[in-house]
Image (cartoon, coloured by chain):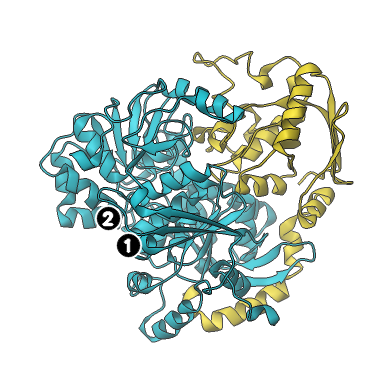
Chain colours: A cyan, B yellow
Amino acid sequence: MAHMNAPRTMLAKIWDEHEILRHPSGPSLLYIDRDMIHEGSFHAFADLKRRGLKPRRPKQIFGVADHYVPTLGRTSKDAASPAIARMIDTFDENMEWGGVRHFGLSSRSQGIVHVVAPEQGITLPGLTIVCSDSHTSTQGALGAIAFGIGQSENAHVLATQTVWQLRPKTMRVTINGTLGQGVTAKDVMLALIAKIGAAGAGGHAIEFAGQVVRDMSIEGRLTLCNMSIEAAARFGMVAPDETTFAYVRGRNFAPNEQEWDAAVNHWRQLVSDADAVFDREVVLEGADIAPMVTWGTSPEDAVSIEGRVPDPSTFDNADKRKAATKSLEYMELAPGTELSGLKLDKVFIGSCTNSRIEDLRAAAAILKGRKAKIQAIVVPGSTQVKEQAEAEGIAAIFREAGFEWRDSGCSMCAAMNGDVVGPGERCASTSNRNFVGRQGPGARTHLVSPAMAAAAAITGCLTDVRRV
Amino acid sequence: MKAFTKETSTVVAVPGVNCDTDQIIPGRFLKADRAQGYGQFLFHDIRRDEAGELDPAFPLNREGAERSTILLVEDNFGCGSSREGAVYALVDHGIRAVIGPSFGDIFFNNALKNGLVPVRLSAEQCDGLADYLARFPDAEVTVDLENAQLVLPGNLRRHPIVIDAFARECILQGLDEIEMTFTYMEKIKAFETERMASHAWLAR
């Protein structure tokens, strides 16, 4: 095959390896190695039942209860309403019915699907992974093709272990140099989305590269890939390297020691060839990125914490002018307002963006010996992260600072389990979406990193973490 | 899936760039069974005022809007969450096509799986259509999938509908994709056997 000799991107290599066939009219029939499912999959299960089908490859399906789970208690009886409890119970029933391995509410492996999957070794380099959740892009951080699908596609995967998909274009985002003190993967992503826009990477798969990425922990890379979808990229990826291999080794669903060397040798071949051509290139300088905060209702509405709320009348695009004006009305903010010092009602640390152990450590480092001035909750990304944080003494720091130390789940990011930000309340949140009503009807969200959220908790307002 | 060949209708313009799926259907409604009908949740929070009453200024609430089966939207419509409920809400409301400059990738795919036709039209042409509709609200637009053409009113001409041929064929015929994929099962199984031989841990 001639194309095997042409330089290829990592996306192309993994894609080619999973392409069962290509339809004459364009899309590939891709083999799906692993499908992660959560409570929202009930539509797909209803579809299977209607057809008299069962999951075809149950061992390659993994269920995790996360979107609707209570964070105060670990049974469905603790759920915020009977309707929410029913979602959790239906999920368990569907998993039993389908013979699917699942991490239910009481499991020690439970957590947010995109935190659990890497933690369990379900996410591995070179795999194709889908989940009916847009933040599945997160899992590409280990060098996989991982993307969000809808319930129709989910039913298709459950029934066939394949999905029809058009190959996306590729965008390489290179982040050079090093990040300044107090600047994290979250800030990199907010800076990137502010630069290219919330629609900026539509139709593309992003591969993150550059010194900042090579130096970054797996946790940080997961945060980068997580927020790719906020730039409209359905896929985020980082080339697997020694950091990846060390992270993956020994995890539950990873290759065992006998299989290990062969697996790593294969994974090393998957990185983009040096002369591979990307459809688009974007370059950021790590040193130019400051701790970021959003002021509006799209993740692209992000500026440095040293900045001010922009004046929509200065925007050159009429649609953006209109959108920003509406955003500011919703956010109850006036143009020119300094973001630092803006009074808050709540702080939320959690979500598949920023709830891993490193995130909690970063927040705890700021909180140690200090007190939160406003209501603050921390929701670890998984039960294992929670246990680890308790063992490391981090939980105690949060509690002493006045934070509520909750059980793991999507919680106040998706606001489907009853954990919400009240109408008109202003919340500094480590989650990924500041959409209108996302954290509850009328809720006002400012996206920040975990360290920035901690700094906000102790001052009661948006605060430059470098100054606390 | 309901087959789609051609749809002619008046158009409702829903303003706002980056209209995410949380706006199309807020997360708290996603618990509903499809049998309940998702149309009642469409744009739930943004089409109501603070008291929960339908806001007469919201385009979809205007008189006659309920007869329209085509929406005109702005850039990056359907971004955000992968919730297919956003497409269910549009479809159950009776919407059959959405015209806009760009769509969230997952929303775009979800739409195609449900026979909702997303039509990409340049931002300038969308603006032109919006201006025209503001002057002539009863003007009709035709989404002719069979001939892959969008037929706009007045002097706005015809524009090609660019959807990959595979998806177009599925929608035109109302094909069931799972049934269709089953016809490739031998190839899938052969591929799978080979893959499992070198990746035994995948299905342990």
Locate residue A152, reporting x and y percent: 64, 51
**Chain ID for label 2?**
A
Q: Residues within 10 Å of mark 1 (few under 14, many from 20)?
A: some
The answer, for residue A353, to whether it is visible in the render is: no
Task: Identify which residue is drawn at 53% across, 35% down.
Answer: B22
Q: What is the three-letter code of the residue carrying label 2? A: Glu
* Residues marked 1 and 2 touching at CB (< 8 Å): yes
| Residue A215, above or below B172 | below
Tell me the quarter of the image containing the C terminus of chain A.
top left
Which marked residue is nearer to the observer: mark 1 or mark 2? 1
* Nearer to us in this view, A181 or A108: A181
Residue A325 tag number: none
Quarter in which the N terminus of chain A is drawn: bottom right
**What label sits on residue A358 in the rendered view?**
2
Left or right: A325 as drawn, with respect to B156: left
Residue ID for mark 1: A217
Q: Residue at x 82, y 54 (%)?
A: B169
Q: Secondary structure at mark 2?
A: helix
Residue A82 in the image: x percent, y percent? Answer: 43, 35
| Residue B74 in view of the camera | yes
Q: Position of residue A376 (x, y in %)?
A: 25, 35
- Distance (Cα) linking label 1 and label 2: 9 Å
Front position in the image: A157 or A273: A273
Is B97 left, or right, of A177 in this rendering?
Answer: right
Residue at disc 1, secondary structure: loop
Identity, as a three-letter code, of the amino acid under mark 1: Ser
Closest to the observer, A375 or A214:
A214
Residue B83 image-quadrant placement: top right
Q: Mark 1 or mark 2: which comes first in sequence?
A: 1
